[in-house]
Amino acid sequence: MQLDRDAIEEFKQIYQREYGKRLSEAEAVEFGTRLIGLVKVVYGENLPKVLFDKQHKKANN
C-alpha cells in the first residue's frame, strides 16, 4: 500500500504532536506503513467501511 503525500504529512504532524519528535519523510512512510499493516492484522476484513470511503473520497477530489 502506498501512502499519499497528504497522509504522510498528516502522520508526521500527529507523531510530532504526540511524541515531540519530527520524522523524516522516510521514517514517516515506514512507520505509517507499519501502522496500517498492524491495523489490517487486528481488524482483518472487518476494517470499518468508513475508512475506505474517506480514502476514496479524498482520491477523487
Image (cartoon, rainbow, N blue to C red):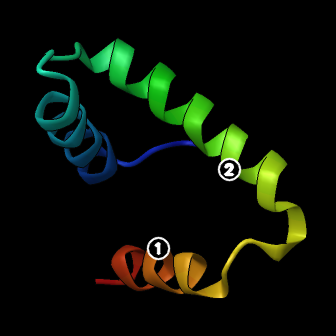
Q: Which mark is residue 47?
A: none
Residue 6 horizontal side relative to residue 31, left or right: left
Does 44 appear above or below 50? Answer: above
Q: Amino acid at mark 2?
A: Val
- Locate residue 53, reporting x and y percent: 53, 86
- Locate residue 1, reporting x and y percent: 64, 44
Mark 1 and mark 2: Cα distance apart in space: 15 Å
Secondary structure of residue under mark 1: helix
How many neighbours does mark 1 have within 10 angstroms: few (below 14), some (14-19), or many (20 or more)? few
Which residue is pictured at 76% across the width and 52% down the height? Answer: 40
Depth check: give the residue in front, 7 or 41: 41
Mark 2, residue position: 39
Does 39 appear above or below 48? Answer: above
How many neighbours does mark 2 have within 10 angstroms: few (below 14), some (14-19), or many (20 or more)? few
Q: Amino acid at mark 1?
A: Gln
- Locate residue 12, reporting x and y percent: 22, 33
Which residue is pictured at 70% across the width and 39% down the height? Answer: 37
Residue 14 found in image quarter:
top left
Q: Quadrant of the C terminus?
A: bottom left
- Locate residue 33, reporting x and y percent: 56, 33
Depth check: give the residue in front, 58 or 40: 40
Q: Nearer the viewer, mark 1 or mark 2?
A: 2
Q: Are marks 1 and 2 in contact (CB under 8 Å)?
A: no
Mark 1, residue position: 55
Secondary structure of residue under mark 2: helix
Residue 46 horizontal side relative to residue 31, left or right: right
Which residue is pictured at 46% across the width and 73% down the height? Answer: 55
Residue 44 horizontal side relative to residue 34, left or right: right
Does 22 appear above or below 39? Answer: above
Residue 13 found in image quarter:
top left
Q: Earlier in the sequence, mark 1 or mark 2?
A: 2
